[in-house]
Amino acid sequence: MKKVIFSVLVVCCSFVTAIAQMETNEISIMEKSLNNVQSKQAEFDKKLRQTIITSNKNKQDLRVLEQRNKVLCANIDSLKTVCDSMQKAQAADRTTISGKIEETNDTLASTQSVVENRSLWGGIIAIIILFAVSLISYYLIKRIKRGTSSIDDVRKAQEALQNAQSKMQEESVKLDNQLLEIVQQQLQKKTIASSNTGIPDHSLVVKLADEIARIETNLSKMDKSVRGYKQLVQAKDRMINNVRANGYEIISLLGQEYNDGMQFQTRFVPDDTLPEGRRIITGMIKMQVNYNGKMIQPAEIVVSQNI
């Protein structure tokens, strides 16, 4: 009987021990699960704090952006006001510029008329000089043939002819100086008008080049002692330099040796005073004019030759 009771007790103890072991294992598993849950909770809390910090920072950045947006809106309003005022100013400027361009065109038209009149007067003066020379020469030849003219009479006639020719040359130089002054003023106005429109107008420069051709040809045949000669040369050179600053080049060929390779409109005149076989450019009817390296007017020349 005792053995049975002992066996029962042993079995009960084993059962109790097994149950305790099972509870211990379950507790251990629960503790591990709890630790995992606590670890995840701590990680979640950490991420939550970071999210809160990021959210606060984003809110602060959003406030800064809102302030900047307000500043930009204010600047845009200010720029709109400035643009409106600029548009009004540009409209007024366009009206003013259009008026100035029309005024300049009217002035240019009158200037071209003046230039043409000056050229006409220059031609008339040249014709008068030639007529006076021819008349006096005819008179002298006629008197010499008759034998009634003395040496003193001839000298007096020559002096009168020289004085008349000198007066004519001085008047021609004076007119040319005045002409260049007028053209200088008009070139300045025309440069301003062209800069406003952006379209170059070569008409006045080409007209100036033709006048310079005439002036240079006359100067080459004129005594340097004529009153106003040096001033006219300086004014002519100054005009050439002024237009060069705007991209124009006025090319003079006066005094150069002529050769068959020159592609110019040429008028040949005989001249027995030159050495035999020589051909010299002694007159410029039109100057060659280049603009930014491109020819806009070819030269027209007079060549004296002894061939």
Image (cartoon, helix red, strand yellow):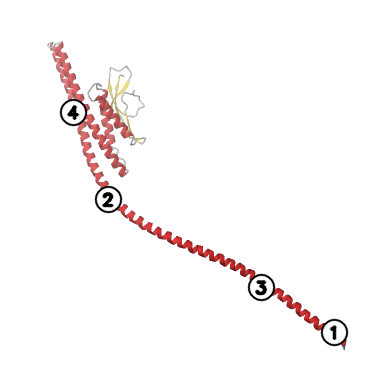
Mark 2 highlights which residue?
92
Task: Residue 7: give its label.
Answer: 1
Mark 3 highlights which residue?
34
Quarter holding residue 130: top left
Which amino acid, mark 3?
Answer: Leu
Q: Can residue 248 be seen from the camera position used here?
A: no
Circle 3/circle 2 CB separation < 8 Å = no
Q: Secondary structure at mark 2?
A: helix
Nearer the camera: disc 3 or disc 2 = 3
Front in this rendered view, residue 139 or 79: 79
Relative placement, left or right, of 165 versus 216 is: left
Q: In the image, what residue occupies the spot 17% across and 25% down?
A: 128
* Mark 4 crowd level (few <14, some 14–19, many ≥20, 10 Å Cα): few
Q: Secondary structure at mark 3?
A: helix
Tell me which numbered mark, 3 or 4, is placed earlier along the sequence: 3
Quarter holding residue 299: top left
Mark 4 highlights which residue?
124
Which amino acid, mark 2?
Answer: Ala
Relative placement, left or right, of 88 versus 40 is: left
x and y percentages locating residue 26 in the rendered image? 72, 76
Marks 3 and 2 sit apart, C-alpha to C-alpha, by 84 Å
Nearer the camera: disc 4 or disc 2 = 2
Front in this rendered view, residue 137 or 153: 153
Marks 1 and 4 sit apart, C-alpha to C-alpha, by 163 Å
Which amino acid, mark 4?
Answer: Ile
